[in-house]
Amino acid sequence: MFDKFSDQARHVVVLASDAARTHHHNHLGTEHLLTGIHAAGGPTAATLTNWGITSPHLDSALDEIPAYPNTDTECAGPPFTPTLTKTLVQSLREASLLGHHTIRTEHLLLALLADTTCTGTRILTHLTALSPHQMRDHLRHQLTEHPQPHE
């Protein structure tokens, strides 16, 4: 699936893994994906910033999650949670529904927001006055206003 990801979307996953390690988490979840999206910069990060999301807010939210170090020394990084795996698969659907062939950071955020119970979405709704539905509508509008370059 990662072959469908843009370079920036792949970089988001690397940054998410870094965030999990930094916070001593033994998993890679949607909360880390959200942090990776913000840290990667670009239009999606700018949208999060416009919604009032900052790095200190996200770091604080990650600090509230209990730290359980990954004890598997053979593992290259923390394993994906089932929810994150579902979100990554959903990002492919989000891109496909919009007629896009490449998964970008906007599709990752759309997929994250599709699950209102996941930790990443709960963090967003705690930090903003917007509902997940409003955020998804804003992102979809942004994607139709600024379509993907030819892939």
Image (tube, rainbow, N blue to C red):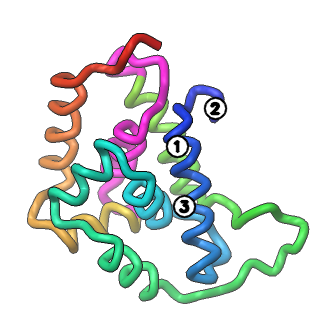
Q: Which of pointers 3 and 2 indicates the residue nearer the eye?
A: 3
Task: Please give the residue where the numbered disc 3 appears in the rendered image.
Answer: 16
- Secondary structure beneath dot 1 equals helix
* Mark earlier in primary sequence (1, 2): 2
1 and 2 marks in contact (CB < 8 Å): yes
* Mark earlier in primary sequence (1, 3): 3
Front-most of 38 and 128?
38
Question: Amino acid under label 2?
Answer: Met
Q: Residue furthest front?
A: 41
- Where is residue 38? Give x, y as percent: 37, 58
The image quarter in which residue 16 lies: bottom right
Quadrant in which the N terminus is drawn: top right
Query: Disc number at residue 151?
Result: none
How busy is the neighbourhood of tag 2: few (under 14 within 10 Å), some, or many (20 plus)? few
The image quarter in which residue 144 lies: top left
Task: Please give the residue where the numbered disc 2 appears in the rendered image.
Answer: 1
How busy is the neighbourhood of tag 1: few (under 14 within 10 Å), some, or many (20 plus)? many
- Where is residue 116? Give x, y as percent: 30, 57
Question: Amino acid under label 1?
Answer: Leu
- Where is residue 7? Give x, y as percent: 56, 36
- Where is residue 52? Give x, y as percent: 17, 66
